[in-house]
Image: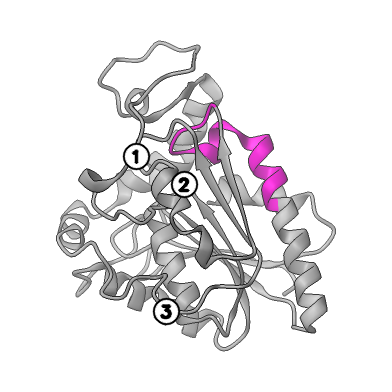
Amino acid sequence: MVGCCEPVFAAREGSYRRLYPDLPGMGQSEAVGVDSSDDVLQSVEAFIDEHIGSEPFLLLGESYGGYVARALAAHRAYQVRGMVLICPMGSAVENADRRVPEHQVLVSEIDLAPDAPFAEIAVVQTQETFDRTQREVVAGLMCADATALERIRTRWALTRDPESGPPFDWPTVIVTGRQDSSTGYLDVWDLIEHYPRATFAVLDAAGHNAQIERPEAFNTLVHDWLDRVEHEITRRSCPRTALTGTRTPACNSGKVVRRQTDTQQ
């Protein structure tokens, strides 16, 4: 999340306090007593209570982190002032139930073994996308607690569906990849009516790491989202917010770990 978000904030005149927590079992965040997605959600809520408290904040989530982010937006609708979902899990939680396209490669500029993990997921296979994927995705996965993730995976679905309550009416952007063979875009489109202030983008030449394979389009969408959030905060006379992202950044140490950029809130 750091790699795709920080260039956007560096280019803006305003400043936000940014927090990048590793989810339990990911990066080097511990997962003691975390046995389900419900437990993951509870851990992230505890992180918010400790580091943000009752102040409003913005929320970004990618892949499974997008699933958790949607639940946070539902649980804390009084506090979340906007949300970005990057290639999130959609209406189908289990892999077998998802409507996804077959994997295909549209740009191939480097030699890869056919069974290499990057080759199996990347749609745009260049040195740049490979290097960014290693830094921003693989580094965190290499630090992950595989046993804990397997344990959580057996109770993958949240007890309460994130879209079971009232619609989330703050500015949102949902970014999907047209060639995403992991979570796709069709199941994500099923969520659209729950987010009446959402921009929904299906990016061509993009797979499950659309923010890496289509960085210019991603940056434009996030800038537009921030513009809309800032306008809406002004319109509703709300205070400025913190920013929290959920995914798997590079390794840290500690219990629930965060990356923090100390900027004005």
* Label 1 crowd bin: few (<14), some (14–19), many (20+), radius 10 Å: many
Q: Which label was assigned to residue 103?
A: none
Say which of 224 and 244 sits in front.
224
The answer to whether the residues at label 1 and label 2 have Cβ atoms under 8 Å apart is yes
- Name the quadrant containing residue 46: bottom left
The amino acid pointed to by label 1 is: Ser
Q: Is 160 placed left or right of 49 in the picture?
A: left
Q: In terms of sequence position, does the residue under pointer 1 or pointer 2 come before the other?
A: 2
Which residue: 42% across, 79% down?
45
The answer to whether the residues at label 1 and label 3 have Cβ atoms under 8 Å apart is no
Q: What's the CA distance linking mark 1 and mark 3?
A: 27 Å
Which residue: 52% across, 20% down?
127
Relative to 81, say whether 142 is above or below: above
Residue 155 visible at all = yes
Say which of 24 and 198 sits in front.
198
Relative to 127, say whether 232 is above or below: below
Residue 203 lies, in percent from the top left, at 57, 35
Which circle, 2 or 3, is nearer the viewer?
2
Identity of the residue furthest to the right in this view: 13
Give the magenta part as a residue range. 205-222
Q: How is the model colour-coded?
A: one colour
User: Which residue is the site of mark 2?
Assistant: 87
Which circle, 1 or 3, is nearer the viewer?
1
User: Which residue is the site of mark 1?
Assistant: 182
Which residue: 28% across, 55% down?
93
In which quadrant will I find the C terminus? bottom right
Q: Is 169 placed left or right of 151 in the picture?
A: right
